[in-house]
Amino acid sequence: MTGLRRGREAWGREAWGRLHVTLRDLPLGVLILAASLVPASHSRGTEFGGLPDRPFDAMAVAAIALQCLPLAARRRWPVVCLTLVSLGFALDQLRGYHSLAGTALPLALLSAAAHLRRHRRTTVTVFSTAYVLLVIEFVRRDTSEPPAEFVTFYAALCLAWGIGMWLRNTRIAEADRRRRIAEETRAAERTRIARELHDVVTHHVTAMVVQAEAARYLTSAPDRLDQTLSAVTDTGRRAITDLRHLLDLLNPDHGIEARAPAVGRLLTLVEQTRRAGQPVEFTEKGTPAAETGSADLVAYRVVQEALTNALKYAHGSRTSVQVQHSERDITVEVSTDGSGSRAAASPGGSGRGLAGLRQRVDVLGGEFSADGRPGGGFVVRARIPAGSGS
């Protein structure tokens, strides 16, 4: 029953939100109109100008309707609403009805200040002038109202306008904040996808280039040539598979296949690098945490980028990959012997490789380093906290 009630409430809110704004604002005006016509409320509303009370007549009903019904347009046409309500208020007070409908004037002022987009200063000037003319008319009719009351009432109207201005500024500030958050989110997503593309394309293409170069020298060994070309084909297929996973980031309906845990694919990554001609020793210890968040994917990307650099700058040199799991973090160390230490240890090429990995690890609160080894080669180390996000 509770779920059914909540469903009906949600449906009601959705149906109400689909109504035109004037229909949603109309009930407030109708409510004030009904309250103003109740006999017990006659002459118990706003008293401005000091003129004596007058019994309600047909003109009173017109004045009340002129003040209340335009509230339906207070957001759609704020200036029209304020103009009509002001005319009704002036008629109400000059005739001495002093109805409850006078409460519509500050509401119209507040709405105009909150929703008027242009000519705000002109509106203030025109209606302030109209107020002065109304005061002059009361003085001409020998009103008993002291001047201080006119000033106080004008200050109250200014307060209503100021509240509307505050609501408008708050709404604009909130819209700007949401827009900035949306822009930052889009920029972060573009950066994340760019990093994924760099990691996937660079690694697979590098492996394919190395394998294709090796095939040029195997024309006299058909068996090894066939094996190498098969490795190129397999690498291309893996690249297509990874690119399809990236497409899922842009279009969730593109594919529905579940993606295997990143760390669980490390052995496949190492085997692919071995088939490209890089001798790799792989060691994986410990039990992965129950919830790793983004840590497993970042660990996979660290190994992938380090092996890509090994293929580029230290091809054929002995490479070691060590992965240590614990409940708190994942530790990765990739070291390579060879003469390409400087190029591999520092962010080479476009600078998006190891530099991007450093940013990824930093976001998760981990530690990252990429240094050259004294005897040649390089070593990449990363400690990634487990369960650091999704």
Image: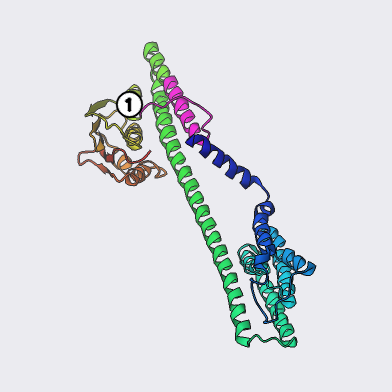
> Residue at 40% across / 11% down in the picture?
222
Q: Position of residue 9 (x, y in %)?
A: 55, 42
Q: Nearer the viewer, residue 220 or 229?
A: 229
Q: Position of residue 329 (x, y in %)?
A: 25, 38
Tag 1 secondary structure: helix
Q: Nearer the viewer, residue 305 or 71?
A: 71
> Residue at 33% across / 24% down in the picture?
277
- When asked about the image quadrant of residue 292, the answer is top left
> Residue at 54% across / 56% down in the picture?
175
Q: Is residue 185 above or below residue 292?
A: below
Density class for disc 1 (Cα within 10 Å; few <14, some 14-19, many ≥20) is: few
Residue 222 visible in the picture: yes
Q: Nearer the viewer, residue 248 or 131?
A: 131
Please indicate whether residue 52 sits to the left or right of residue 382 in the image: right
Q: Position of residue 177 (x, y in %)?
A: 50, 56
Is residue 381 inside the magenta stretch? no
| Residue ID for mark 1 | 264
Q: Amino acid at mark 1?
A: Gly
- When asked about the image quadrant of residue 342, the answer is top left
The span picked out in magenta is 232-261
Identity of the residue furthest to the front in this view:
40
